[in-house]
Image: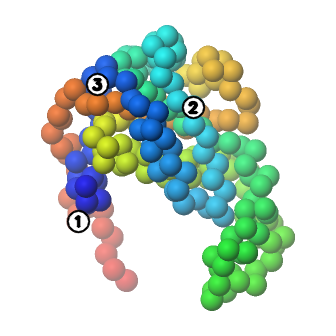
Amino acid sequence: MELKTVIAERRSIRVFHSESLKPEIIGELLEAARLAPSGTNLQPWRFLAVTSEEKRKKLAECTFGVNFIAQAPLTMVCCADRSSLATRSERLKELALSGAFAGTALENFSFSDYQKKAARDEAANLVYLNINVAIAVEQMVLRAVDLGLGSCWVMLFNQDKVRELFSLPDNLYITALVPFGYPAQQPPARPRLPLEEIYLGEV
C-alpha cells in the first residue's frame, strides 16, 4: 500500500474482531517501531505485548472506561525508558562512528559540551522521551494499516495500576496503550482543520 494511502486510510478503531494476531504480525509491528528515528538515536521505547484474554481484561480495568482494550487481540503497552538517558554518550559515539554527522558542522562537536547544553530537568526529560516513543508508536500504527489492522491510541489509563498489573520497573513511564486487531468497523474520516489554519506560511 502506498504511504499516502496508509496515512489517508488510518482511523482510530474501537471495535475489533476477536481473531488473534500471528506472532509474525506482532514482529512486523515491533520492527516498524524499532526502525523509528529518535533524538541522538536514544531509542528509549520499550513495548509489552498483551495478548492473553485474562490480562487484556485486567488491563481494561486500569483504564477509564476503555473497554475495547479487552476486545482487541493485542494491546501494546508503550513505555519510555528513563534509564536510556544514561546511554546518550554511547549513542552519540555510535552516530559519529556511523558517519551520521559527516560533512556537517556536527562532525567535530564535543560530546561533553553537548551533554552540558542538552541538560534538562526531570519533567523536560520525560517530555523528550515521550516524544521519541510517540514517533515509534506512530510508525507501528501506520504499519498496522498496511497489514490490514486497526488501532487506537489510548491515554485514559491509570499509570500506577498498569505498572502494578505488569510489575513494570520504576524506570519505565507508560506513554500510551495501543490496541491492535482486525477492524470490525469502518468509521468515516474524522474532521480535520483546513490547511490554511495549520500552515503559518513560508519565510
Left or right: where 26 falls relative to 6: right
Residue at (66%, 79%) from the top-left corner? 99
Q: Which residue is mark 3?
A: 16
The C terminus sits in image quarter: bottom left
Left or right: where 172 falls relative to 52: right
Q: Which residue is mark 1?
A: 196
Disc 3 on helix, strand or loop?
Answer: loop
Disc 1 from disc 3: Cα separation: 35 Å
Answer whether labels 1 and 3 touch (C-beta < 8 Å).
no
Rendered position, 88 above or below 148: below
Answer whether labels 2 and 3 touch (C-beta < 8 Å).
no
Disc 1 from disc 2: Cα separation: 40 Å
Residue at (76%, 80%) from the top-left corner? 109
Q: Earlier in the sequence, mark 1 or mark 2?
A: 2
Nearest-to-viewer mark from 1 and 2: 2
Q: Earlier in the sequence, mark 2 or mark 3?
A: 3
Residue 10 visible, this angle = yes
Name which residue type carries label 1. Answer: Glu
Name which residue type carries label 3. Answer: Phe
Name which residue type carries label 2. Answer: Leu
Q: Which mark is residue 41?
A: none
Q: Position of residue 42 (x, y in %)?
A: 67, 56
Q: Which residue is mark 2?
A: 48
Residue closest to the eye, 124 or 85: 85
Q: Position of residue 10 (x, y in %)?
A: 27, 45
Disc 1 on helix, strand or loop?
Answer: helix
Residue closest to the eye, 78 or 124: 78
